[in-house]
């Protein structure tokens, strides 16, 4: 049952609420001041706080609720005997999960709490999903920035922060052209043109050749880039996804092979992207006519939102076991690697051409239904694929290409 922090400076009222909630199965703790509530919340990590707006002491209820939200992301339901417009406007700014106007009865209290606890659980799952997505995207060697339909930045991964000089906190909510300064050979910024062309549905949205990326500090880097549309669940344009990475001959010759990521994945037991990168480098040096096939599980983030992170982890591990068996049955491969997030990689060959490699991958049955007894649900799963030659480009460039595909797929699937 949920844990509820009760912030109420009238002892009789506080004890009455505590008794009612304890009878309904809630775990409770009491605080009589904003300062005490913050201490208890840090220690007990409650799921929800019931906060009286009018409190004696330095912090009133609204100031306390704001501090609880900013520091601990703790949702709040307000208790108040004051429902005047000014008080409600102040309270509204903290985005509460509900209001209880004194005096209230037991039924109203329990109904409000049940709804608030449910909403809080959904918000927690959403934060966890975003954290997982951010973690996966931060492993990529390419910069990724996504925007909404208005061109305002709503995601910037670690590599993009490094290349642009903008932190996530600084960039979120700003116009793309203000964060990502892409210039042509004439030193003219074309970021806005790229964005508008993509949003307008223009087919040729990628300029030829390299662009200059001017960072916040004025440093210039030649980059390659790809821009693509992000669609929502109604197949309407939700924004754009722009992937970029250092390019040019000099950059490729001097770029070290990035092997970020663990050598093994604790969730699936598969070798990780570090070991995959080493195999890619060795195969390239031998010019062995090997290829890399990338598999990105479809609807990964949709499943997380619908069923929660724990169920999605079960889905992912079961699908990767299935995918491993398919790869081992159909290909002469090194086995399956977990690249990042919902992306898996295999290295296979030798084969004579990229066309032969794609034909070999097309024989793998990517679709499979899984019966999740814990959820009483039958899920139909599949994966998006891409195939790359290990001989045609340097390993560092190839990894950028792989990460570009992963970044675009993950953002497209999030909606």
Image (cartoon, rainbow, N blue to C red):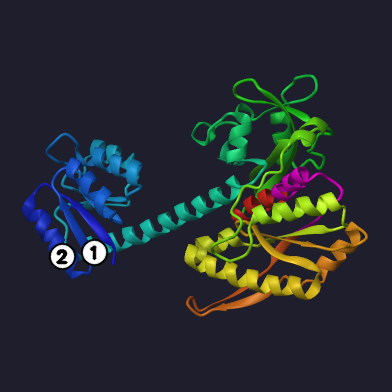
Task: Please say if 87 is above or below 339.
Answer: above
Q: Nearer the viewer, residue 313 or 81?
A: 313
Q: Residues within 10 Å of mark 1 (few under 14, many from 20)?
A: some
Residue 297 rendering spot, x and y as whole percentages: 65, 63
Residue 404 rendering spot, x and y as whole percentages: 71, 47
Q: Which residue sits at x=54%, y=70%? A: 314
- In the rendered view, does 323 fall on the left or right side of 52? right
Q: Which residue is mark 1?
A: 110
Task: Please say if 381 is above or below 386.
Answer: below
Q: Nearer the viewer, residue 410 or 114?
A: 410
Task: Please say if 92 is above or below 282.
Answer: above
Asked whether residue 301 is in view, the answer is yes
Q: Which residue sits at x=76%, y=34%? A: 254
Q: Which residue sits at x=62%, y=53%? A: 232
Numbered range of the magenta stretch? 386-404
Asked which secondary structure carries label 1, the reply is: helix
Please tell me which of labels 2 and 1 falls first in the chain: 2
Residue 65 rendering spot, x and y as whole percentages: 27, 43
- For residue 329: magenta? no
Tell me the number on the disc at residue 243. none
Furthest toward the left, the residue is 12
Q: Nearer the viewer, mark 2 or mark 1?
A: 2
Asked which secondary structure carries label 2, the reply is: helix
Picture quadrant where residue 386 is located = bottom right
- In the rendered view, does 18 fall on the left or right side of 259? left
Tell me the number on the disc at residue 20. 2
Task: Please say if 383 is above or below 370.
Answer: above
Q: Residues within 10 Å of mark 2 (few under 14, many from 20)?
A: some
Q: Which image quarter holds the C terminus?
A: bottom right
Q: Are marks 2 and 1 in contact (CB under 8 Å)?
A: yes
How far apart, in angstroms, are the residues tagged by discs 2 and 1?
9 Å
- In the rendered view, does 207 fall on the left or right side of 412? right
């Amino acid at each position: 049952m949920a844990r509820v922090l009760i912030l109420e400076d009238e002892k009789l009222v506080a004890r009455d609420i505590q008794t009612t909630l304890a009878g309904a199965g809630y775990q409770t703790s009491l605080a009589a001041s904003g300062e005490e509530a913050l201490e208890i919340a840090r220690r007990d990590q409650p799921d929800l706080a019931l906060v009286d707006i009018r409190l004696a002491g330095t912090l009133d209820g609204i100031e306390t609720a704001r501090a609880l939200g900013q520091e601990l992301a703790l949702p709040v339901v307000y208790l108040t005997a004051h429902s005047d417009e000014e008080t409600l406007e102040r309270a509204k700014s903290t985005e509460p999960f509900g209001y209880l106007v004194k005096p209230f009865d037991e039924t109203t209290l329990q109904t409000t709490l049940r709804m608030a606890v449910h909403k809080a659980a959904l918000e927690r799952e959403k934060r966890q999903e975003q954290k997982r997505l951010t973690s996966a995207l931060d492993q990529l060697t390419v910069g990724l920035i996504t925007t909404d339909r208005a061109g305002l930045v709503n995601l910037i991964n670690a590599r993009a922060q490094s290349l642009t000089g903008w932190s996530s906190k600084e960039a979120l909510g700003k116009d793309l052209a203000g964060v990502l300064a892409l210039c042509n050979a004439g030193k003219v910024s074309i970021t806005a043109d790229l964005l508008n062309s993509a949003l307008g549905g223009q087919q040729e949205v990628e300029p030829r050749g390299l662009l200059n990326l001017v960072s916040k500090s004025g440093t210039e880097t030649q980059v390659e880039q790809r821009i693509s549309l992000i669609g929502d669940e109604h197949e309407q344009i939700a924004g754009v996804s722009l992937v970029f990475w250092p390019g040019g001959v000099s950059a490729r010759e001097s770029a070290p092979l990035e092997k970020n990521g663990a050598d093994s994945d604790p969730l699936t037991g598969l070798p990780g992207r570090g070991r995959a990168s080493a195999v890619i480098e060795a195969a390239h040096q031998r010019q062995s006519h090997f290829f890399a096939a990338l598999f990105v599980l479809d609807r990964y983030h949709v499943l997380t939102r619908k069923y929660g992170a724990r169920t999605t982890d079960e889905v992912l591990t079961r699908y990767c076991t299935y995918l491993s068996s398919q790869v081992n049955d159909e290909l002469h491969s090194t086995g399956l690697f977990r690249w990042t997030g919902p992306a898996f990689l295999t290295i296979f060959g030798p084969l004579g051409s990229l066309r032969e490699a794609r034909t070999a991958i097309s024989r793998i049955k990517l679709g499979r239904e899984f019966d999740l007894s814990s959820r009483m649900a039958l899920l139909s799963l599949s994966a998006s694929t891409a195939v790359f030659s290990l001989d045609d480009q340097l390993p560092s460039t190839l990894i950028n290409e792989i990460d570009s595909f992963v970044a675009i797929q993950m953002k497209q699937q999030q909606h």
